[in-house]
Amino acid sequence: MQSLTAAAAAIELRGIDKSFGAVHAVRGVSLAIPRGSITGIVGENGAGKSTLMSILYGLYRADAGQILIDDRPVDMASPRDAIAHGIGMVHQHFMLVDTFTVLENLMLGAEGGPLLAGGFAAARAELARLGREYGLSVDPDARVADLSVGEQQRVEILKVLFRGARMLILDEPSAVLTPQETDRLFEILKSLRARGVTVVLITHKLREIMAVADRVIVMRQGAVVAERLTVETSTGELAELMVGRKIRLDLDKAPAERGQTMLAARGLSLVDRRGVRLLDGIDLELRAGEIVGIAGVSGNGQTELLQVLSGIRPPTAGQVEVCGRVIDPARPIDPAEMRALGLAHVPEDRLRQGLVAAFEASETSILGYQDQPPYCRNHLLDAPAVGRHCADLMQRFDVRPQTPGLRSSHFSGGNQQKLILAREMSRIPKVLLVGQPTRGVDIGAIEFIHRELVKSRDAGCAILVVSVELEEILSLADRILVMSGGRIIGEVAADQADERALGRMMADA
Amino acid sequence: MEETLTFITLTLAATLRVATPLVLCAMGGLFSEKSGIIDVGLEGKMLMAAFFAAATASLTGSAWAGVVAAIVAAEALALLHGFACITHRGNQVVSGIALNILAAGLTVVLGTAWFARGGQTPPLGDGERLKPIFFPVAGDNVLVYVALLSVPFTWWLIARTRFGLRLRAVGEMPLAVDAAGVSVAWLRYRAVLLCGLFSGLAGAYLSIAQNAGFSRDMTAGQGFIALAAIIFGKWRPFPAFGACLVFGLLDAVAIRLQGVKVPGVGEVPVQLIQALPYLLTLFLLAGFIGNAVAPKAAGVPYEKEH
Ligand SMILES: Nc1ncnc2c1ncn2[C@@H]1O[C@H](COP(=O)(O)OP(=O)(O)OP(=O)(O)O)[C@@H](O)[C@H]1O
Ligand SMILES: [Mg+2]
């Protein structure tokens, strides 16, 4: 351990403890983060990583413990204190004002005087300088709402640097990025480190940690269970430390036994109000007992394809046939009817489409099925039955904490995902559409979710998986379709595909 | 020819007179709404201010004391709204409606108790009112000019200052403001206080400038018309000002048209003419306002979870 703490600590935590009601989220965490390093923090969903960093940034108050910055104890009562001590944070969910320009977002809270005029000029100059120095270029006058996710993240990092931060915390920065954007991000982080910035990186992707971090801290159930130098460890060891057991991500699944066609799309097109062609002549067939994976750089129509197939948006042209029912522009359908046909959908954007943040977990666990027995009798919800159902799902899918009465938004991201998957899969659907099944999900849960999906497949369910994680597509799918520009540009049998070839197809399009 | 000119001039002057309280109220409401605090209590604040302006002017004999009292009264309600919505994260619409009911009741009760005139204040003499400055017929008292200046002032404050930048941000995404280390509550309190200031002036205008005394329910829905003007103006000062002028013009024309026979139609019923501004409000609200222009966080209390 000596070598780990030899360098001067930029940040030191001593005995940090935090509970939310009955949930003991962080248990007596002590750790030191050396100056000018990149430190990774890994851990299962709900391990307390985000909570710990929120305490460091003054968003939450610790129940006990001490924070030392540059060896001096400080009181982090609010983000203002954190900023004053040179700490900046890029949150899991971005903290940007959509309607503002990049420059306005940059200046918010650091305007440099009561009038904006002078500050704007200075900010513009500073932005140009940061852009040159760290290779972080964005158009200062673009509206944030018009930027891609990767660019928005760059704005978040610029915001932090603009305030002169010497310590940067990133909470799952790559969860929403394309592989190319992730590579860019890591180059940026390395150039920050070269200039003496201390970086803390939370992620579920162990390979990323190995690629970019100097050291890694492993958390489990609110406590730090291990610290390693990345050169002295491996993804295998980290995974085992995180979960407390051996993890096997390679699914050895039997070849698919394809049954009859459950879902077929023919010439499916979608044009939005501005006339942009989002889907362009999609032909697709999904049979019982197979998993079809859709690979592609995000933003190439995958989101819209799921929306059309699940009945959320009607197609502009073409048709979909689901379990015998034909859907086309003249005969649209709504998601409730789709469900009745035996189709279940796990949406990509779980916070907005998968659950209602303010609802209790038990309510989330029946969302979309709330009018069906046994949850609903004589138009009234049967609360005990709903509670029992939720407790049962939580048990089976290992959702933590197992508290059906907790607000959905108070679960960590990965546990929200498990709850939604549990809801949809427990209905034993004939067709299952899954968008980004393991976004923000820890490695133990990935293993679990993948196995559950394969189990459903073997029971005869037709499954369509959309994911930006090539690795995931490769291990899950029986057939892989590659999407680009709203079209399907190729199909590969899973046993003949490899990551490099798929990546080339996606990039060439 | 000359007659038409006089008609136009008089109508324009009347428009400005009628629009002044709307403009003041709309600018006040704009600050509040931009910060994410919906204010349906503009009406109540204006009414309360109108009462205290007239009561104080009548008791002290000073119009300026009336103006000060109006501001104090409106600020008191504004603080109450802030306390309910910002500090205690209550429902903003409910709080606003409660303020309106409170003001409607309290002004009558106090008026009856103090002056025993069925809720009215005694008629104010010339010295107790704000008088026209340049053109006696036009009624251009000081508050008319304040209202005209309040529009560029509001624009400047919102678009060009640090306070304005933070105000806009807090109405869109309070979390971002909090994460930037700026207090959400203090920003919103300041916005609500600005709203109190302007609606106080609007109330004073009604009872001690435009009229000579307070009568019960004298605001007659003007607070809501101001709110509608904010929405038509898509939460921008100059367009909101334009909407206020349109409402003022309709009202002024309505007054002029009373008793006039329109060829082919005959005499237009007064009630119909008086209902015009409200009909226009409904009509425009239903069809002409695009969506997604309101501050995104308007009406949503900011909860910081500790
Ligand atoms: N505001 C809150 N109220 C109640 N419980 C909370 C709250 N925030 C977090 N928790 C709980 O605290 C625990 C730690 O959550 P945290 O978000 O820190 O996990 P995490 O390690 O970041 O997980 P993930 O990888 O899924 O993001 C979880 O059990 C979560 O349900
Ligand atoms: Mg987290």
Image (cartoon, helix red, strand yellow):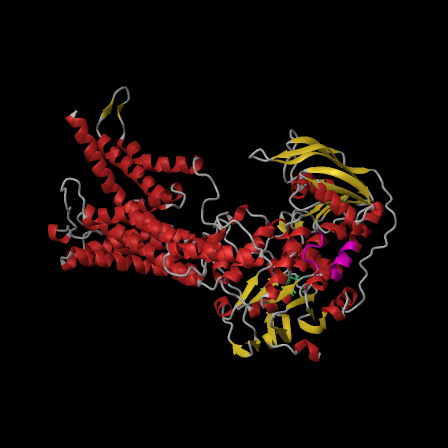
Q: x, y (%) of residue A312?
A: 64, 40
Compared with B94, A63 (above or below) is below
A419 lies left or right of A498: left
In the rendered image, is residue B257 in sight?
A: yes
Labels in figure, total: 0
A206 lies left or right of A459: left
Q: Quadrant of residue B85?
A: bottom left
Q: Is residue A162 magenta?
A: no
Q: x, y (%) of residue A225?
A: 71, 73
Q: Which residues are magenta?
A: A437-450
Compared with A237, A462 (above or below) is above
Compared with B87, B104 (above or below) is above
Dividing the image into four equal quarters, which quarter contains ligand 1? bottom right
Q: Residue furthest bottom?
A: A2
Which residue is at the front of the view, A194 or B54?
A: A194
Q: Residue furthest top?
A: B264
Which residue is at the front of the view, B274 or B156?
A: B156
> Which residue: 26% across, 32% down?
B270
Which residue is at the front of the view, A143 or B89?
A: A143
B257 lies left or right of B129: right
Q: x, y (%) of residue A400?
A: 69, 64
A168 lies left or right of A279: left
